[in-house]
Image (tube, rainbow, N blue to C red):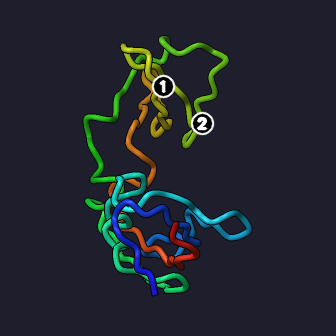
C-alpha cells in the first residue's frame, strides 16, 4: 500500500480542537483539505506527521503552539489613539479589522481592548499561543 512521502498531494478530513475540547475548524460537510506534503502549506506540526501515512489511516495529532501558529508575540499588539480611527469603524471587543502595512500588505487585526483614549489591536493569529489537537483521516494520495 502506498505511503505519503514529501511532495505528494494529499487530501485529508480533519477536526481541529483546543485542549478544552472546543472545535475551531473542521472539514465536516466540506471537501477534504488538499495540500502538498512537506511543502509548508499547512502548519509544521501537521506537515511533519503526514509522511508514512496510508489512505484510510486516522491519527490524532497533539501539536504544541510552537509547531502551529507560534507563541503570542507581545509586539504584535498595539494601542492606537482612538481619534485615529474613523467613527464608522466598529470597536467592539473581538471585532476583526484589516489594516495595511507600510508596504501595502493587508494585515488582519482583532480589537482586544478599548478605553476612552485608546484602542488596542492584536495582529497575532487567533490561534497563536494555543496547543492544538487534530483528528485527521488520509482520504487520498496523488
User: Considering the numbered disc 2 on the image, is that residue within a helix, a strand or a loop?
Assistant: loop
The numbered disc on residue 106 is 1
| Residue at x-position 53% and y-position 27% | 98
How far across and how far down the image is residue 122, in percent?
A: 40, 37
Please state the horizontal and vertical placement of residue 94, each as a whole percent of the image: 55, 43
Label whose residue precedes the other's in the sequence (1 or 2): 2
**Which element is circle 1 on?**
strand
| Residue furthest to the right | 29
Q: Is residue 64 left or right of residue 34?
A: left
Q: Is residue 14 visible?
A: no
Quadrant in the rendering for residue 43: bottom left
Left or right of 124? Residue 95 is right
**Mark 2 nearby-residue class (10 Å; few <14, some 14–19, many ≥20):** few
Q: Residue at x 55, y 40 (%)?
A: 93
Q: Is residue 100 left or right of 94 when viewed as pictured?
A: left
- Marks counted in the figure total 2
Residue assigned mark 2 = 92
Q: Residue at 37% across / 14% down in the picture?
A: 103
Can the viewer see residue 87 in this picture?
yes
Examine the image and state in which quarter residue 4 appears.
Answer: bottom left
Which callout, 1 or 2, points to the residue nearer the camera?
A: 1
Task: Using the image, determine if residue 133 lies above or below residue 105.
Answer: below
The residue closer to the viewer here, 91 or 3, is 3
Comparing 111 with 133, the one in front is 133
Q: Locate residue 115, reporting x and y percent.
A: 47, 29
Q: CA distance from mark 1 to mark 2?
A: 21 Å
Q: Residue at x 52, y 82 (%)?
A: 55
Amino acid at each position: 500500500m502506498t505511503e505519503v512521502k514529501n511532495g505528494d498531494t494529499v487530501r485529508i478530513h480533519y477536526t481541529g480542537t483546543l485542549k478544552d475540547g472546543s472545535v475551531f475548524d473542521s472539514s465536516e460537510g466540506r471537501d477534504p483539505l488538499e495540500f502538498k506534503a512537506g511543502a509548508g502549506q499547512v502548519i509544521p506540526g501537521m506537515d511533519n506527521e503526514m509522511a508514512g501515512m496510508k489512505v484510510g489511516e486516522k491519527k490524532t495529532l497533539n501539536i504544541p503552539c510552537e509547531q502551529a501558529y507560534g507563541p503570542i508575540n507581545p509586539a504584535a499588539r498595539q494601542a492606537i489613539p482612538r481619534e485615529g480611527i474613523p467613527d464608522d469603524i466598529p470597536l467592539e471587543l473581538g471585532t476583526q479589522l484589516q489594516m495595511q502595512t507600510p508596504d501595502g500588505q493587508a494585515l488582519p487585526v482583532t480589537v482586544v481592548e478599548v478605553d476612552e483614549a485608546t484602542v488596542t489591536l492584536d495582529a497575532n493569529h487567533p490561534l497563536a499561543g494555543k496547543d492544538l489537537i487534530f483528528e485527521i483521516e488520509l482520504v487520498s494520495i496523488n
